[in-house]
Image (cartoon, helix red, strand yellow):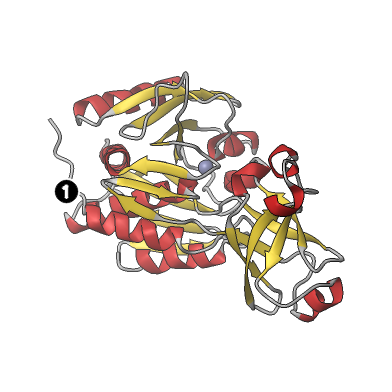
Amino acid sequence: MSNLPEINTPFLLDFLTKLLNTPSPTGYAEAAIAFTEESLKAFPALILARTRKGALTVTWRGEQDEGPRAVTAHVDTLGGMVKEIKSNGRLKLSRIGGFAWNTIEGESCTVFTRSGRQVRASILLTKASSHVFGGEVGEMKRSDDTLEVRLDARTMSASETLDLGIGVGDFVAFDPRVEVNAGFVRSRHLDDKACVAALVAAVKALSDANRKPARTTTLLISNYEEVGHGAAAGIPADVEELLVVDMAAVGEGQTSDEFHASLCVKDSGGPYHHDMSNRLRALAEKNEIPYKVDIYPNYHSDGEVWWNAGANAAVALIGPGVDASHNYERTHTEALVATVKWVMAYLLEK
Ligand SMILES: [Zn+2]
């Protein structure tokens, strides 16, 4: 039998939509960190702080201080950085995070200049027009050399682009194209904003019901996960176990789907902590949370980052199933709600 508090699903979806619409490529995630921080200020029991690296840490005093725990999700996303201003005035991109070039072809984007200006743009093949290039458009291999950023500004040369204030090192954020339809949430960057939203929704549900965690818990809203060092810093050294909340990989051969939360027992970094994973399975069953158990074949999490940084603790990973990850992603509200419940059940576990 479950006695978990009621989840405010409209709040969850509203927070998630706003977070998805807040650009935050790794290295330029401040706006999303600030938005999350602002939302969590509504809960007076939380102590909010920043790491020197810019991540958000949230300390939530539990029923007991012994055996402290941590829970993490990351707010940074895939993105790009201006690598080069081309002689035609367009931009060459360097990728932030791991994605295939074809997944951003045709996407709209925003270039953030050093002075804070935002220039709208789109990402296209260097030979984009079928009327000019014919069959080549379909055949060209997509790469940093064959995709370029076309600015919505009058420029035909490198100097005209420089005059716009654009330079090497400017961040580029891809449009998320968020849509909520029939329970589905379709957007870029559900990895891992879906899970940040799940943590905030769990805090709200527990707080509204006047509940608090069994153990003192640190929530780390990580800001460098996509490049592999997010949770290397920010989790107190006395923390005994870390629950990583990140998307589950959906696709052929996977057990995960968009309607369940998944427990990942192994990914590219090896197995997660067996006992902690088994406790999470027991919690899901006791609380009637729809869940799957899965292995993710091309995946690393902030939990392994913390382990590799020397953490002496148990680490486990759960999260909602996300279809077409690191592409135009999609999940379903049922998976999000299952994740929120699982996080709450974990926080309340004695
Ligand atoms: Zn992720």
Of residue 46 and residue 268, the one placed in the foreground of this image is: 268
- In the rendered image, residue 24, in percent from the top left (x then y), is placed at 56, 60
- Residue at 27%, 36% (x, y): give it: 349
Left or right, 133 with reference to 226 = right
Residue 87 makes an appearance in the image: yes
Quadrant of the rendered image containing residue 38: bottom left
* Rendered location of residue 177, percent (x, y): 46, 56
The quarter in which the C terminus is drawn is: top left
Compared across the picture, whether 338 is left or right of 222 comes to left
Badge count: 1
Mark 1 CB within 8 Å of ligand 1? no
- Asked if residue 179 is positioned above or below residue 280 in the image, the reply reads below
**Residue in view at x 60 percent, y 44 percent:** 103
Q: Which residue is mark 1?
A: 6
The answer to whether 83 is drawn above or below residue 287 in the figure is below
Left or right of 143: which side holds 176? left
* Secondary structure type for disc 1: loop
**Quadrant assignment, res 250:** top left
What is the crowding at mark 1: few (fewer than 14 residues within 10 Å), some, or many (at least 20)? few
Foreground: 253 or 42?
Answer: 253
Q: Is residue 215 above or below residue 150?
A: above
Q: Residue at x 60, y 57 (%)?
A: 25
x, y (%) of residue 92? 77, 57
> Is 170 or 4 nearer to us in this picture?
170
Query: In this orientation, which residue lies closer to the viewer: 75 or 242?
Result: 75
Specify the amino acid type for callout 1. Glu
Asked whether the viewer can see residue 125, the reply is no
Extreme front residue here?
Answer: 131
Q: Quadrant of the N terminus?
A: top left
Tell me where residue 244 appears, x and y as whole percent.
46, 39
